[in-house]
Amino acid sequence: MSGTHQTPNNPSHSTFKRGYARDETKRLLLHGLKNDEEVLVQPPPTIHPEKLVPKLVAAHDLCAVYTAPTKRQLARIEQRFNNNGVTTQRVRSQYDLCGSYSGAHNNDIEERVKDHIERGATLGNLHEDRKLPCQPGCPFGGRNPPPFTEQVILAHPKHIYMDRILEDRHIFTCSLRGDAYITELDNPPKKLNSYIDTNTDFIDYRDFMRNRDMNCPPFAPFLSDYPFNSFEPSDPDKEFGYDIDKDGHHLAPLAVFGLLHSEKLPNGWETSYHRRESNLGSPTPTHQVNQGPNPFEVVGLDYQRHRVVREPGETPEDDTLYVLKVPNYSKAKNVVAFDIAPTSWMWNLYYGADFDHQRVYSDDETAEFLHQEMDTTVIQTATRRKPYDSSYHNQNRSFTPGRDASIAVWATGEFGKRPHIVSTNKGFRAYDAKQPALLRDDAERGIQYRRGESVITDDAPLVILNGSPRPQNEEFQLWGALAGKSVPGSPNQQGSFGRVGDEVRHQFSESRVGKWATRFTSKDATLVLNTTAVPELLQDSRLVTYASPTDVLTENSSAKRKVARFLRQQAKEGERATIGEIESETGVSRQTIYTARDDFEDEGWITAYHSERPTEYEWDS
């Protein structure tokens, strides 16, 4: 379900005021709270729900849970709640609580504990069955869950498996992190053999899969005497809500059950989530491959919250299983999610919900808001997506560290301030290796797409988006299979993955670029888009009005960049420089300095003082 707030047929000037946009965002956030409905709010750029939610919780005296994937984000939102007089309690992670797990006692203990957890145990389980050096005194030793009594609970998405923190609370989230509810099981024999041997008539994973495949098509159901109750995985863990199974990995029962009720997709992957074309031509989910009793209902599984996907390998050991197990959010009053440019079906899938997708402005209205109210200028410098999550070695032409550095030098000269550089982790690694001066001298701050940084509070901020985040190819097939769809592989980094695959890429690429392109609050922002992977709202001709600087400083103009940096540093110290001083300090040839001088004068970046002998030059910006 989705919708867009209906603005008047002839929107007034006040419709595009920031106060209106903020009030409408609050209204949409409150809509779900008042009606106990799941709502996915798409706020306008520069309106940040994480700043509004604490005020709403305080004003309406709500009991809530706020989830975020990083400690930094949780610490920041905790401060905002506290500033509004709201009491908070953070769900501490395993690293915080147990010295044996965190390596406080020694690395051997840490490795042994983590090995047991990898094979399906939990910390509470280990403290109960083994003597660990953190005992006595470790909170896990007593297995007494802490009470959650504060007005707001701050948690990682994984903590939502604990039902007791959900009851009678509203949930706020901005997280779509696949590593929270989707568990990757590589080398399935290692993870599943013990469970299969104990609970089925088969010896191991290889034996199970061979017998399963002998009965296809279709795969399932083929075991008429398969004990449905063998799905039940023993006791729930009291600390983190994970299921414990002493016969193997804690997700082994769900993985085996999903494999038993899977079907192949055209791309070779398998999924337990089946879709069929209805009489009206629209795809609808169905719970079984063949006619007969609904196996998910028989074992009491919520079909929307439990899905299993298999990526076949050359051998059973090379298979990869992905198990989606969504916490039971229905125990909460409602879930309110927010994202700058979401792919709705992915949020629905990940939270096992049917979000009402609401937005304040359409794409066209958003561009008008940025143009009319925020005076935002967009500069497009790229002709490619420039995926910066791949290797930055020579074979990948997407990485252009030299050109990125030149764009930063140009932007500093053109706008008189150092920019914020936004890129991927691998992008920053490339700069450290090939252009260390970029982050040291040319940028105000480096921001990673995947990190939970704060809002940029500069007046008239200057932001450069270098490259785009891009998941590995398997991510496209995985999310497609979770939705019961076959996603083809792409022939290259720039190509299409089909409709569903491109929607996945939009969520993990365009949406993230759009988020960080608009993480500011003040007017007169300048956005330099060194990627074409941007949402529609940033491609409007009312915004992209500035000529590209591609010819001012080319990628190989490292000598010119040295001249610009030297003159800029001199200006900071209140000094000018002669040609001879520039040559002596930078090591750049005199002819190149003359060329750079002429270009910088044409751009209006430097002023020549001919009254001095020899002539002195000063950086003006």
Image (spheres, rainbow, N blue to C red):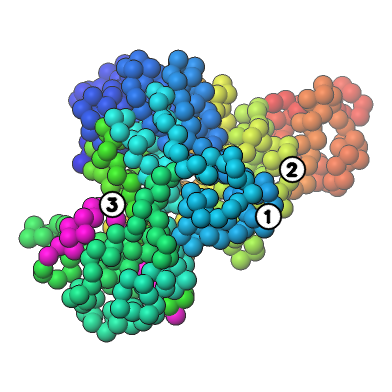
Image position, residue 211 (x, y; %): 30, 82
Mark 3: give few (<14), some (14-19) or many (20+) Cα within 10 Å.
some
Residue designated by label 2: 437
Q: Residue at x 26, y 32 (%)?
A: 333
Residue designated by label 1: 107
Q: Nearer the viewer, mark 1 or mark 3?
A: 1
Image position, residue 236 (x, y; %): 36, 50
- Looking at the rendered structure, which numbered label has been put on residue 215? none
- Does residue 196 appear to the left or right of 68 in the view shown? left
> Can you say which quadrant of the picture contains the N terminus?
top left
- Does residue 503 appear to the left or right of 451 in the view shown? left
Q: For the residues marked 1 and 2, what is the alpha-carbon distance in whole angstroms? A: 37 Å
In which quarter of the view is residue 356 placed? top left
- Does residue 349 appear to the left or right of 319 in the view shown? left
Q: Which residues are magenta?
A: 293-315
- Which is nearer the eye, 127 or 239? 127
| Three-letter amino acid code at the position of disc 1 | Asn
SS type, badge 2: helix
